Image (tube, rainbow, N blue to C red):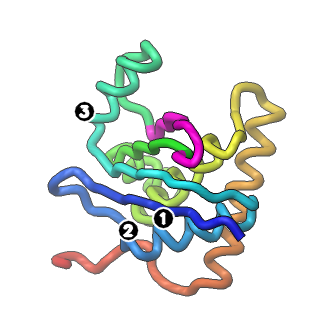
C-alpha cells in the first residue's frame, strides 16, 4: 500500500478543521485511489488565493481551491481559501471545517488525475468526492470544527 505524506499549513488567524482529521481524510482518499506520494495543503485567506489565481491562471479574484501538480513522488500543492469555504458552507448548510476538508479533497483528486473541465468529468469528479467524504465520515466519526477558543 502506498503512503501519502501530507504537510498542512494555515495562514495566521485562519480557523481550520483539526489537522489530524484533515490528514486522515486525505490519507483515506489516497488509499482508496491506490495512490501515494507527498502533498502540501495550505489553508489561506481570499487575498492570498486571489494572488495565486491571477498569477497562475490569469483570473482575477479569489477562488475556493487551487491545485498545482508536482513531480512524483511529490504529487503537488493544494491551496484552499478558508474565507470562500466559510461562505460556501453557509450556502450548502454544513460547517466551514467540513467545506475546507471537502475542498482539500477536491484538490487532491485533481492531483490524482481527475478534472472538471466539462460537465461529464465534473459530475464524475464531484460524485467521487462526495463518495469518499461520506465513506470517511462513516468510518471515522468526529467533528470538522474545533470549538471556538481552541
- Indicate yes or no whether the magenta region holds residue 108: no
- Residue 76 marker: none
Q: Residues within 10 Å of mark 2 (few under 14, many from 20)?
A: many
- Looking at the image, is mark 3 or mark 2 earlier in the sequence? 2
- Looking at the image, is mark 3 or mark 1 earlier in the sequence? 3
Q: Secondary structure at mark 3?
A: helix
Residue at the image point whose x is 29% and y is 25% from the top: 51
Q: Is residue 2 above or below residue 135?
A: above
| Rendering coords of residue 127 (x, y %) | 76, 52
Q: Which residue is mark 2?
A: 17
Q: Is residue 140 above or below residue 130?
A: below
| Rendering coords of residue 128 (x, y %) | 75, 55
Question: What whole-number distance in Å separates the C-alpha atoms at marks 3 and 1?
Answer: 21 Å
Task: Give the quadrant of the C terminus.
Answer: bottom left
Nearer-the-camera pick, 29 or 6: 6
Mark nearer the viewer, 1 or 2? 2
Q: Which residue is mark 1?
A: 98
Residue at the image point whose x is 71% and y is 71% from the top: 1
Question: What whole-number distance in Å separates the C-alpha atoms at marks 3 and 2?
Answer: 20 Å
Q: Which residue is mark 3?
A: 47
Q: Is residue 50 above or below residue 136?
A: above
Residue at the image point whose x is 23% and y is 56% from the top: 14
Residue 64 lies in what quarter of the image?
Answer: top left
- Looking at the image, is mark 1 or mark 2 earlier in the sequence? 2
Residue 6 lies in what quarter of the image?
Answer: bottom left
Q: Specify the segment rendered in magenta.
A: 64-74
Amino acid at each position: 500500500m502506498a503512503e501519502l505524506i501530507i504537510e498542512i499549513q494555515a495562514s495566521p488567524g485562519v480557523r481550520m478543521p483539526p489537522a489530524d482529521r484533515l490528514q486522515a481524510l486525505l490519507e483515506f482518499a489516497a488509499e482508496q485511489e491506490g495512490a501515494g506520494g507527498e502533498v502540501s495543503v495550505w489553508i489561506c485567506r481570499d487575498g492570498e488565493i486571489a494572488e495565486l489565481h491571477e498569477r497562475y491562471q490569469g483570473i482575477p479574484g479569489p477562488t475556493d481551491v487551487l491545485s498545482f501538480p508536482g513531480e512524483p513522488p511529490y504529487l503537488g500543492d493544494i491551496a484552499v481559501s478558508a474565507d470562500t469555504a466559510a461562505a460556501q458552507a453557509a450556502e450548502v448548510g454544513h460547517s466551514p471545517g467540513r467545506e475546507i476538508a471537502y475542498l482539500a479533497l477536491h484538490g487532491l483528486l485533481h492531483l490524482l488525475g481527475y478534472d472538471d473541465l466539462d460537465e461529464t468529468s465534473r459530475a464524475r469528479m464531484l460524485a467521487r468526492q462526495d463518495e469518499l467524504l461520506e465513506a470517511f465520515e462513516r468510518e471515522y466519526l468526529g467533528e470538522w470544527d474545533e470549538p471556538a477558543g481552541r
